[in-house]
Every structure is written in C-alpha cells, then in structure tokens.
C-alpha cells in the first residue's frame, strides 16, 4: 500500500502540466487491468499494473539506474530508457510486459519501408509543443510520441464503429481512434480554390483545459509532417512536389494539397464526397448498371462516409497490428497490396484493365480492389468496358498518387508533374469531364492529342458532361 501511495504521488510530479492524473488513469497504460507492467518493477517491488514507476525512474528511486544523458544534458522525462526504446520494452520483439499483452511493434520498424523512429535525439521539447521548425528539414523525425500520447492512449484502433470512433454519423469515420488520442495535429486553412497548397494552419494541441484534446481527426496528425507545415522550403508550393525522396524512392508530396475539399476529386479523408465544395455532381461513386462500385462497409451511406489514411497505409501482412509503422510493401500499402505496379506474382508491369479482365490475381494484390468493386460480370464503368482500353496502364488516365486531383475521378493530365504523372511521361489526357453516370460516358468526355488515344479522343470539344459542364476540368 505504501508503494502504491508513492506511485500516485509520483504521478502528480511526473505528468506534464497539460495532463491531469485522471486522463492517465483512464488511459490503457494507466489501467489496473491492461496497463503497463515492466517485469523488473512488477516482480521485484510489487508495484501495481499501470503505475508510473514502470516507465519513470526519478533519481534511480526504485533501485534502477537512469540511462546516461545524451549530449551531456539530463533526461527531461526521467525515463528508464531513451525514446522509442521505452516503448519497445513492452511493444517489442522481446517484450518485458507482465504478461506480454502488447503486440510486437518493434519488428515492423525493421522492415524496408517505415516511419524513421531510428532518427533519435531530434526532440527538442515535448511532442505536443513542437512547431513547424521542429519538424522541417533537417529536423524531420517520426518517433513514437509524435503519433501517440502515452498518457492518454486508449485500446481502440481504427476499426470502423469501435469506441471512440463509435459515431452515429458516417461523416465522422475519420475521427481519431483510441491509440491516437491526445496527440498534436494541424488543420490546414484551405483556400476556396482547387489544387492549391495551404501554407497556414490551425494547431491542435492538448492543453490544461483539454488534456486529451489535440488532433480530432486522423489526417490532422498525418498532415503535421506531410504538408507544408512539416515540409517547408523543401516543397515547391506551385506543384506540391518536394525535393525529399521518400523510402519508396519517390518524391514526397503535399498531402494537404491532395486532400483539399476544394479539389474536384479525392478519397474522402478530410470530407465526405457529397460534402466536397469543389467539382461537379455526381460526387459520390453512385451505382453502375452492373451493381455497387464499393465493397462493404463502404457500400452504405455512399457519399456520406469519411475514411482514414490508415485504411490504405499500414502493415503488409494480415495481422492485428494497425497503422503505418512499417511494411515490406512499397508506400506502406496495407495487406501487401500494390499500386501502380503489379507484383511479379501477377505478371509485373503497370496495372491495366486487361489484368483485371483476364485473371483473378488482382483481387488480392491491387490496392484499389480492397474497397472498390472493379469487375462484376463486366466493368462497372462503360469507359473501362471498351476493349479494356487496349491494355493501357491505369496511370495513363489516373493519378499515380491517388489521394486527390484537380480533375474529377482522380484523372491525371499530361501537364501534371511526377510523381502524379507516373515517371512524368505516362499520362495521356489534356482534358476530362465527368459523365452523369458511370454508364453514360462518350468519346468526348476525354481529350487527348497523343496517339493512340487521339484516334477516338482527339477532339478538344467537351461532350456528355454532367451538370451542364461546358468545359473540361482545369
């Protein structure tokens, strides 16, 4: 009992000023049932599960020793190890939790494509107090506490409908899940114009009045690094393309630009399709004469749902671990799926409509097929049915970075730079307008001056456009 009382006193001393004890004790780490339990402390000192002493050692107060300070400065957090090593002690390959209830996250950071937690020593202040200068080159880093608040974290992952994402409105499917609770994020101040880079942001931080506050939606957490906020001068604000090459060998791009609600099209990460102010109706993927174009659970409330970044980015194997920690799949695509290249098991090369029509390999490997019904006794789009477009790669018409587009239906133009235009050379179109239904496209919905597309789409004269549109998308 005496040790337990000491532990709660230590909680008050150690918790950052913005975090009340009640937030920690209601978190999963502070839970008396599932909370932290470092074996050496739990077994040798009879310290209850969830007690602060499992992570913090003030002046070697429980017979341990603090790690030697880096750079000669004392550790600001009184942790028994440095940075991610504290997390890996329980969430690692050799878990020391009692019993080992947590999953092995450490193994994911050994994979080829990962967030760079190994860039240690770059935190100059608590993660929730960092600014854009702390995240921009040369300080770019991504440690565990940049995405997770260990004092406020809950058990729930991004499974739709589970607490705290159990909202009655499908537009709230992008609300932060329990594991991201209490983290620092940013909301871009988008201009009311399509395909425009936002350069100002509203910072969302937990504070003394809202210790479990901060980012409200998952994308706000991601955008503090994957936007001008964290890219700064490394970005060309005219194109959204940066001088930084990512682990997948492709230039990083501005995802606040790509997911702007004012773009003509985009995956519904920031806003539901029907609520997008940019573009023309129909904005949602309405049914084709061949059936629904979306798989469960996306085939209900069509046009009203939002989604997570982690619906597409995460572990490459079918495990219970969620989120984009690390993967052996390029771009950290979930379940080992691929885009825009097909894996060797499916024949390699760029994905084409012929791949879909002639085999079933795409069903388990093409990223789009995770959520979209692409083929149901025929393509669910009359454009795709016409000769399978003669084996033309998907990226001849669609963005190689399929987050969003200045044109409808994620269409890419020849004038778009790489990596949106795959290798800067693959795109074929100079104009596009969306039809009123997936079954009513004509040759004049697309304009291309290059062969072989120009044989049927060589007239720079829009036709068959929805909503009385009289010109091609910009």
Image (tube, rainbow, N blue to C red):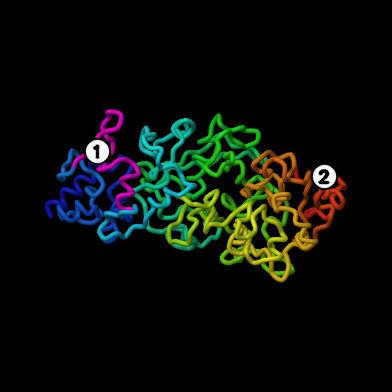
- The image quadrant of residue 78 is top left
- The image quadrant of residue 99 is bottom left
Mark 2 surroundings within 10 Å by alpha-carbon count, few (fewer than 14), some (14 through 19), many (20 or more): some
Apparent side of residue 393 relative to residue 67 in the rendered image (left or right) = right
The N terminus - image quarter: bottom left
The answer to whether residue 190 is seen in the rendering is yes
Residue 258, position as x, y percentages in the image: 62, 44
Mark 1 = which residue? 67
The C terminus - image quarter: top right
Mark 2 = which residue? 450
Residue drawn where x is 62% and y is 61% of the image: 369
Residue 175, position as x, y percentages in the image: 49, 53
18 or 473, nearer to the observer: 473
Verify CB contact (< 8 Å) between mark 1 and mark 2.
no
Note whether 238 is above or below 473 in the view shown: above
Residue 236, position as x, y percentages in the image: 61, 32
């Amino acid at each position: 009992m005496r040790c337990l009382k000491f532990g709660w006193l230590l909680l008050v001393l150690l918790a950052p000023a913005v975090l009340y004890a009640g937030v920690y004790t209601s978190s999963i780490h502070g839970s008396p049932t599932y909370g932290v339990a470092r074996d050496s402390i739990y077994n040798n000192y009879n310290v209850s599960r969830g007690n602060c002493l499992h992570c913090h050692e003030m002046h070697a107060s429980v017979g341990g020793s603090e790690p030697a300070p880096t750079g000669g400065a004392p550790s600001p957090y009184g942790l028994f190890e440095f940075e991610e090593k504290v997390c890996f002690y329980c969430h690692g390959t050799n878990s020391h939790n009692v019993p080992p209830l947590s999953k092995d996250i450490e193994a994911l950071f050994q994979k080829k494509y990962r967030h760079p937690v190994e860039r240690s020593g770059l935190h100059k202040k608590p993660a929730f107090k960092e600014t854009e200068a702390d995240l921009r080159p040369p300080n770019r880093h991504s440690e565990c506490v940049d995405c997770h608040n260990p004092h406020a974290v809950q058990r729930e992952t991004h499974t739709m409908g589970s607490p705290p994402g159990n909202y009655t409105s499908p537009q709230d499917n992008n609300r932060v899940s329990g594991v991201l609770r209490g983290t620092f994020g940013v909301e871009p101040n988008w201009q009311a114009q399509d395909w425009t880079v936002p350069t100002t942001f509203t910072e969302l931080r937990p504070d003394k009045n809202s210790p479990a506050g901060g980012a409200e939606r998952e994308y706000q957490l991601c955008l503090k690094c994957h936007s001008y906020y964290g890219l700064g001068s490394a970005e060309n604000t005219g194109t959204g393309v940066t001088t930084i090459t990512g682990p997948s060998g492709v230039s990083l791009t501005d995802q606040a630009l790509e997911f702007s609600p004012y773009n003509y099209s985009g995956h519904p990460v920031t806003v539901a399709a029907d609520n997008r102010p940019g573009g023309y109706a129909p904005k949602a993927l309405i049914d084709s004469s061949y059936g629904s174009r979306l798989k469960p659970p996306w085939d209900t409330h069509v046009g009203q749902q939002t989604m997570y970044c982690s619906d597409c980015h995460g572990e490459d194997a079918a495990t219970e671990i969620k989120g984009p920690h690390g993967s052996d799949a390029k771009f950290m695509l979930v379940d080992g799926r691929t885009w825009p290249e097909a894996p060797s098991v499916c024949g390699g090369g760029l994905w084409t409509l012929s791949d879909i029509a002639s085999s079933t390999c795409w069903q388990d490997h093409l990223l789009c097929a995770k959520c979209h019904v692409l083929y149901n006794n025929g393509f669910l789009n009359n454009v795709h049915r016409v000769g399978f477009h003669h084996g033309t790669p998907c990226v001849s018409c669609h963005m190689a970075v399929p987050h969003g587009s200045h044109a409808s239906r994620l269409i890419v133009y020849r004038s778009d730079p790489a990596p949106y235009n795959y290798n800067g050379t693959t795109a074929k179109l100079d104009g596009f307008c969306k039809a009123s239904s997936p079954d009513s496209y004509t040759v004049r919905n697309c304009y291309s001056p290059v062969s072989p597309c120009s044989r049927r789409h060589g007239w720079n004269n829009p036709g068959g456009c929805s909503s009385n549109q009289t010109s091609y998308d910009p």
